[in-house]
């Protein structure tokens, strides 16, 4: 299994990214609720990605959530240029925030590098302000 990691341009928080995904979601032919992230380059390690991989999102310098990968679909776009639709499942799963610098495009992301999912009890215990979560993460306490 392998994951992808991507900077979410234009998102200001988990909620803003989740709202955008919801607004752009549809029912995929697999029967799963999904949205599409378009990219020019098709990931070459498709089999590994589709064996339970996710796309992790960076917002404001922190990995904040992930979406399970559903499919990779290739589309033609002009002569000699393809376009890949990365089909991402909904809902987005919050993860324990972890600082990560931004970059262009997407990158492969090993499971051993991925932050843990937030548990229901962690989400319910308190509506911890994002700034405090970020600070706790910086201190290595999350």
Image (cartoon, grey):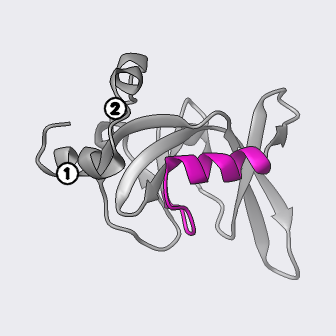
CA distance separating discs 1 and 2: 17 Å
Q: Assess whether mark 2 and mark 1 are in contact (beta carbons under 8 angstroms).
A: no
Front residue of 8/5: it is 8
Task: Please name the residue that numbered disc 1 is placed on.
Answer: 135
Label 1: which secondary element: helix
x and y, in percent, of residue 91 in the image: 64, 33
Q: Which residue is mark 2?
A: 116
Q: Residue 46 at what x, y percent from top left?
A: 61, 46
> Is 138 rendered above or below residue 84?
above
Q: Is residue 128 above or below residue 82?
A: above
Question: Where is residue 142 shown, x and y percent of the image?
Answer: 20, 36
Residue 18 in the magenta stretch? The answer is yes
132 sits left or right of 29 in the view:
left
Residue at image position (78%, 49%) is 23
Q: Nearer the viewer, mark 1 or mark 2?
A: 1
Tell me the quarter of the picture where residue 108 sits. bottom left
Q: Which residues are magenta?
A: 6-23
Q: How many marks?
A: 2
Residue drawn at 43 percent across, 19 percent down: 120
Please, what secondary structure does the residue beneath circle 2 have?
loop
Q: Does residue 7 show up magenta in the picture?
A: yes
């Amino acid at each position: 299994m392998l994951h992808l990691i991507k900077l979410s341009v234009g998102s200001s928080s988990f909620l803003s990214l989740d709202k955008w995904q919801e607004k752009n979601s549809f029912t995929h032919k697999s029967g799963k609720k999904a949205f599409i992230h378009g990219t020019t380059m098709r990931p070459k390690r498709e089999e590994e990605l589709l064996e339970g991989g996710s796309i992790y999102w960076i917002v404001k310098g922190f990995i904040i959530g992930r979406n399970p990968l559903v499919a990779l679909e290739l589309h033609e776009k002009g002569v000699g240029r393809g376009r890949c639709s990365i089909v991402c499942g909904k809902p987005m799963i919050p993860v324990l925030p972890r600082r990560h610098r931004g970059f262009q495009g997407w990158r492969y992301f090993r499971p051993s590098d991925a932050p843990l999912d937030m548990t229901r009890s962690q989400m319910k215990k308190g509506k911890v302000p994002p700034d405090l979560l970020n600070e706790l993460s910086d201190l290595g306490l999350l």
